[in-house]
Image (cartoon, rainbow, N blue to C red):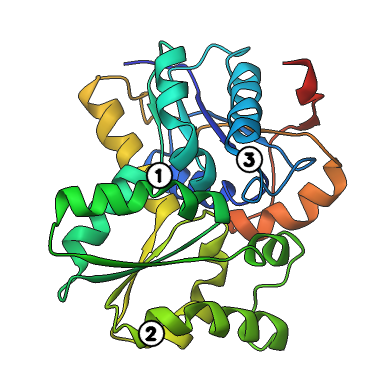
Amino acid sequence: MDSRPIGVFDSGLGGLTAVRELTALLPGEDIIYFGDTGRVPYGGRSRETIIQYARQDVAFLRSFDLKAIVIACGTVSSTAMEVLERENPIPIIGVVEPSAQAAAQASRNGVIGLIGTQATIRTGAYLRRILALRPDARLIDVPCPLLVPLVENGRFRPGDIVVETVVGEYLSPIKAAGADTLVLGCTHYPLLQEVISREMGPGVTLINSGAQGAQAVLRRLTALDALNEPIRRGICRYFVSDSIGSFVSLASIFLGHDVTGEVAQVDITRY
């Protein structure tokens, strides 16, 4: 048993979808979440900048005594995972590996779609992993730079003509290729799941990267015998690099419930 908290970070609010899944799977675990809301989105940044930001995010989280860190960010998971694993002695768990595994297993026809940030698509991390697991697969990957800003501004609901138009344009080549599985390669995208599902149709399986990451945490901590006793409800603490007010107003939507834990602002440039 290990009663230390789990650290989770993302470029903004999207990682809260992973926190939502984690608290459902592991209700006894304490969680410390950092959202780099002052520098969101990461997806259009260079590899060097993404790694710099990721190192600072991890350095802040490691100012707490953690048992594991979850990279609840597709961009960082695909760009900086190996660097962070090499530099840190505690388990670092990303979303690319478990999501790629789930997609390879779920696809019936081997045609798999992927939507993500420009940086995620640029790395080719999903392509390499899916092909290693399923050499017959065909991956249609589409960068979607407008989706994170839309979601961060509360624009993700069905009936929003802007969101539906943007999503329809991005998904067009994936639909045309006949994909039967679609990886939501950014933890912001589950909030768009209803819009995406309607666009793709009922025959397409959607892979939620935040949910897959949470499952990976459960497997990893179980293997390490590092789960907390589930005799109490875990506590969540939230830290952001920008306004607390704007975080609280949207975080409840990502989490599916009101924010009840501590919320504080941190100067991430100090780390």
Name the side, left or right, on which 133 lies relative to 44: left
Q: CA distance from mark 2 to mark 3?
A: 29 Å
Marks 3 and 1 sit apart, C-alpha to C-alpha, by: 20 Å
Q: Is residue 21 above or below residue 90?
A: below
Q: Is residue 124 depicted above or below 26 in this figure? A: below
Q: Pointer 1: residues within 10 angstroms few (<14), some, or many (20+)?
A: many
Q: Residue at x 59, y 59 (%)?
A: 256
Q: Nearer the viewer, mark 2 or mark 1?
A: 2
Could you tell me how far apart the alpha carbons at marks 2 and 1 are, in whole angstroms? 24 Å
Q: Which residue is mark 3?
A: 46
Q: In this orientation, which residue lies closer to the viewer: 56 or 192?
A: 56
Q: Secondary structure at mark 3?
A: loop
Question: Which of the two discs, 3 and 1, labels the residue nearer the N terminus?
Answer: 3
Question: SS class of the residue under badge 2?
Answer: helix
Query: Where is the C terminus found, in terms of image quarters?
Result: top right
The amino acid type found where label 2 is placed reads Lys
Apparent side of residue 125 relative to residue 260 in the rendered image (left or right): left
Relative vertical location of residue 65 with respect to residue 36 in this rendering, above or below: above
The percent coordinates of residue 157 (x first, y second) are 65, 78
In the rendered structure, which amino acid carries the disc numbered 3?
Ser
Identify which residue is drawn at 64% across, 26% down: 52
Task: Name the residue carrying label 1.
Answer: 95
